[in-house]
Amino acid sequence: MSTDPISDFLCRVRNATRALHPELVLPHSRLKESLAQVLKREGYITDVVTEGKGIKSLRLKLKYTGRKSVIEGLKRVSSPGRRVYSRCAEIPKMRGGLGVVVLSTPAGLLTDREARKQNVGGELLCTVW
């Protein structure tokens, strides 16, 4: 069991993309599934599948252009020891709008663009570019 499941998720994705693995299997949680769905919606991964009955797992199909991953970088913003919150007007843009900031909001996990559109703020979880 990990004390920071989001950081564990990001580390596994980072390591799998650097090793050019076509897919990644990791332990399931609703938060990880929501984060994977956001990455799929933004075009960073191709597919998310939940497998198993009792002990579930997530299978992510990673996306590449040639021998280079679509995901260039992942960074954890908020951590269990240091939470970072932001109002709607103060949500940062990642790489001039080319990257994505993922937020945990009352409306669920959203990207920075979706949060601004819905006029909600929340906890800054991670950035992806």
Image: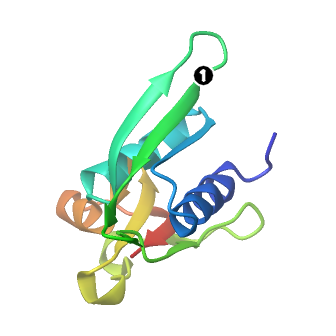
In this view, which residue lies farthest toward the bottom?
96
Instruction: Say what amino acid the circle numbered 1 marks.
Output: Lys
In the rendered image, residue 99, in percent from the top left (x then y), is placed at 33, 77
Decide if residue 106 is in sight here. no
Closest to the observer, 88 or 124 = 124
In the rendered image, residue 117, in percent from the top left (x then y), is placed at 18, 62
Residue shown at the point (43%, 71%) measured from the top left = 128
Q: In which quarter of the image is the C terminus?
A: bottom left
Decide if residue 101 is in sight here. yes
In this view, which residue lies farthest toward the top?
53
Q: In this view, does 19 lie to the left or right of 38?
A: right
Residue shown at the point (24%, 60%) measured from the top left = 114
In this view, which residue lies farthest toward the front?
67
Residue shown at the point (36%, 82%) measured from the top left = 94
How many residues crowd around disc 1 within 10 Å: few (fewer than 14), some, or many (20 or more)?
few
Mark 1 lies on residue: 56
Q: In this view, does 97 lie above or below 58?
A: below
Kindly indicate the quadrant of the structure image that contains residue 66.
bottom left
Secondary structure of residue under mark 1 = loop
In the rendered image, residue 16, in percent from the top left (x then y), is placed at 57, 58
Q: In this view, does 94 lie to the left or right of 60?
A: left
Q: Quadrant of the N terminus?
A: top right
Residue shown at the point (27%, 89%) measured from the top left = 96
Closest to the observer, 125 or 122 = 125
Q: In this view, does 58 lie above or below 5?
A: above
In this view, which residue lies farthest toward the left?
117
In the rendered image, residue 31, in percent from the top left (x then y), is placed at 53, 41
